[in-house]
Image: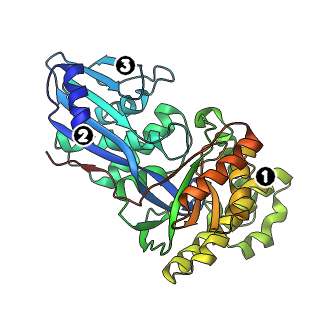
């Protein structure tokens, strides 16, 4: 793949790239919509991701191009940039904007991106681009930021430059992921543990509903505000800074403070989902995959009934998985409103699962889903010359 990208780069820019970098996508195994509530999440990096090839130019401009998109962007080297619209290159442009806000002065640069993460699928294609660009520029120019600083910078791009009030999980897992490991990340303190993710006789199937979601145009920001409303109500009696400081038991004692029924449902999901991550980590450590699978199903039900972010497409996938004897757990992953689900599928049944799920999904939804299996891979890195 890298050789093909080098050829594309050469045709595009009439010169060889001088460096190549890769950043993965991610799936969240459990712990959804609690990253921006200071909770625990359990993401892992996957082997699908985004590649970046780059080389300097003498034209004092930054040129963005992609194998995946027709839109190209050319910008003069300057201190600050402004989001141009919905074009894909606003994600790397935002990284330049944030880095230029410091003492670094960029030079002309030609960049080519390629990704094999389905766009809008909930596997963090945007965060992959952000972390990849930040890591590449940091390495290429010797800026000496550590990975955590690059993660925070990438999150700032997503929140302030792009305008999506997401948490830090996506960028963190893309930067710190390890092969065959899951991360248990505290999104409040940013402390994390690495958990062996030995799936034994099972594989991680990723099912793309092929319903694309535009996160910044979805009800994601509305959910963030509903959680903030719940937090404000609870703070009338208890001293907390985020919802996930509460156990389910303590939340039950104070939930009467939340008058709005919808807001109460949102907060109930957040608190109980945080507890599920604790239990899931214990299950993985004990190699109790059946229990882990049960928690996955419980997570999806909560996201459907209490947080209301699934939709008929994701529900159709998980409903089929619950009836398929060789799947022991399934749930939506990512922000929802479309995107992907994941399932723990018995090895050797990949083809049978794909065929039967496709038939069932087409009958219910009207078009096919995409099913693939990825390994749990490493985080962002430079590819050796």
The alpha-carbon separation of the residues under discs 3 and 2 comes to 21 Å
Q: Residue at x 36, y 41 (%)?
A: 50
Q: Earlier in the sequence, mark 3 or mark 1?
A: 3
The alpha-carbon separation of the residues under discs 1 and 2 comes to 48 Å
The numbered disc on residue 2 is 2
The kind of secondary structure element at disc 1 is helix
Q: In the image, residue 196 lies at what x, y percent?
A: 42, 74
Q: In the displayed structure, does residue 169 sit left or right of residue 319?
A: left
Q: In the image, residue 210 lies at what x, y percent?
A: 61, 39
Badge 2 density bin: few <14, some 14–19, many ≥20, Cα 10 Å = few
Q: Earlier in the sequence, mark 1 or mark 2?
A: 2
Picture quadrant where residue 17 is located: top left
Q: In the displayed structure, does residue 292 sit left or right of residue 229?
A: left
Q: Where does the C terminus fall, quadrant-wise? A: top left
Q: Evaluate if marks 3 and 2 touch, with contact meaning CB atoms under 8 Å apart.
A: no
- The residue that mark 3 highlights is 72
Q: Where does the N terminus fall, quadrant-wise? A: top left
């Amino acid at each position: 793949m890298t050789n093909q990208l080098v050829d594309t780069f050469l045709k595009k820019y009439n010169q060889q790239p001088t460096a190549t970098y890769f950043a993965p996508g991610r799936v969240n195994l459990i712990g959804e919509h609690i990253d921006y509530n200071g909770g625990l999440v359990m993401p892992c990096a996957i082997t699908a991701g985004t590649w970046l090839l780059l080389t300097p130019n003498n034209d004092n401009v930054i040129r963005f191009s992609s194998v995946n998109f027709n839109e190209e962007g050319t910008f003069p080297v300057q201190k600050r940039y402004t989001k141009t619209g919905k074009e894909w290159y606003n994600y790397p442009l935002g990284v330049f904007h944030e880095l230029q806000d410091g003492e670094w002065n960029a030079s002309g640069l030609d960049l080519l991106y390629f990704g094999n993460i389905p766009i809008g699928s909930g596997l963090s294609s945007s965060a992959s681009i952000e972390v990849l660009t930040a890591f590449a520029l940091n390495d290429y120019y010797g800026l000496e930021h550590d990975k955590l600083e690059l993660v925070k910078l990438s999150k700032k791009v997503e929140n302030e430059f792009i305008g999506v009030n997401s948490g830090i999980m996506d960028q963190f897992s893309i930067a710190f992921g390890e092969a065959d490991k899951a991360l248990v990340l505290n999104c409040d303190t940013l402390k994390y543990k690495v958990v062996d993710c030995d799936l034994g006789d099972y594989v991680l199937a990723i099912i793309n509903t092929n319903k694309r979601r535009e996160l910044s145009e979805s009800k994601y920001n509305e959910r963030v505000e509903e959680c903030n409303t719940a937090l404000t109500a609870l703070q009338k009696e208890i001293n907390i800074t985020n919802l996930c400081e509460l156990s389910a038991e303590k939340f039950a004692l104070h939930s009467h403070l939340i008058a709005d029924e919808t807001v109460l449902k949102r907060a109930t999901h957040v608190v109980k989902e945080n507890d599920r991550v604790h239990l899931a980590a214990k299950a993985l450590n004990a190699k109790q995959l059946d229990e882990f699978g049960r928690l996955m199903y419980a997570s999806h039900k909560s996201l459907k009934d209490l947080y209301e972010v699934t939709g008929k497409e994701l529900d159709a996938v998980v409903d089929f998985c619950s009836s398929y004897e060789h799947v022991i757990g399934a749930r939506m992953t990512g922000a929802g409103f479309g995107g992907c689900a994941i399932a723990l599928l018995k090895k050797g049944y990949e083809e049978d699962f794909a065929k039967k799920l496709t038939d069932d999904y087409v009958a219910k939804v009207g078009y096919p889903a995409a099913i693939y299996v990825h390994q749990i891979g490493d985080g962002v890195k430079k590819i050796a010359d």
